[in-house]
Image (cartoon, helix red, strand yellow):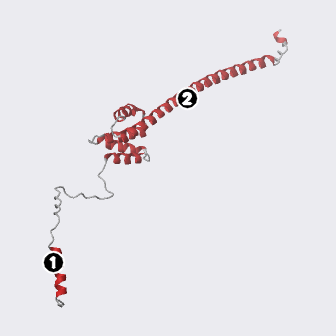
Amino acid sequence: MNHPRLFPCLVLALVLSGCAQPQSPATPEPAVSERPPLVIIRGVRPADPADEAFRDLSQYHGFSEAMLIRELAKLENSSVTSPYIDLRRLVLLWLLGHPESAPRIEVLVNQLIHHPDPRIAATVSLLNRAIAGQRRSNERTAQLEAKLESKLAEAQRRNEQLTAKIQALKALEKDLQSRSEPKPEPAAASPSQR
């Protein structure tokens, strides 16, 4: 049985017998998705109006009054309305600090303070506190100015009274000096007058 060809044939038979074994149940192929594949781009997000608004708010702080007025005019002339635009208006009006803007500021605060976006509500709440503090400060300043004006008027009135008293004393002094000075004696009567 020593055939030289027997060993390779045996190896071939074993290999072929391994291929002929029954296979395990086939796994189903995954179903093809009808959705397009999800593409993730890192670092890029869709524009969020809140992010834009808060970016603008942080820039407004360094603006001059003319720049603030220009920004406010842009918003006033815009046909776009949103809570974020109103938030920008509120901040611009507050930063300008014109007293005639107080009613508009109050209306905007009341509209935005209960906004569902917590960032807007929190920002408006902080602004409302700052506005209230500024209002209290302005009231205190007005009270102090009124007191100072009152004291200044009182000081001016006292100054005028003292000036009048000094003038009266000077007049009295002149009168007393004129009375205390010796009067020149009348010249002796001339013989012709006798």
Which percent across, then down, holds residue 4?
18, 91
Q: Which amino acid, by three-letter code, is at mark 1? A: Leu
Using residue 37 as the reference point, say whether residue 104 is left or right of it: right
Quadrant location of the N terminus in the rendered image:
bottom left
Quadrant location of the C terminus in the rendered image:
top right
Q: Which amino acid, by three-letter code, is at mark 2? A: Leu
The residue closer to the viewer here, 127 or 9, is: 9
The residue closer to the viewer here, 140 or 15, is: 15
CA–CA distance between discs 2 and 1?
108 Å
User: Helix, strand or loop at disc 2?
Assistant: helix
Q: Residue at x 77, y 17 (%)?
A: 176
User: Helix, strand or loop at disc 1?
Assistant: helix
Which percent across, then down, holds residue 28?
16, 60
The picture quadrant where one finds residue 171 is: top right
The picture quadrant where one finds residue 13 is: bottom left
**Residue 29 versus residue 50 in the image, above or below:** below
The residue closer to the viewer here, 161 or 187, is: 161
**Residue 5 versus residue 83 in the image, above or below:** below
Q: Which residue is mark 1?
A: 16
Q: Are marks 2 and 1 in contact (CB under 8 Å)?
A: no
Q: Which residue is mark 2?
A: 144
**Residue 159 versus residue 78 in the image, above or below:** above
The crowding category of the residue bearing disc 2, from other C-alpha atoms within 10 Å (few below 14, some 14 to 19, many at least 20), is few
Pointer 2 or 1: first along the chain: 1
Check the image and name the residue furthest to the front.
1
The crowding category of the residue bearing disc 1, from other C-alpha atoms within 10 Å (few below 14, some 14 to 19, many at least 20), is few
Of circles 2 and 1, which is in front? 1
* The disc label shown at residue 97, or none: none
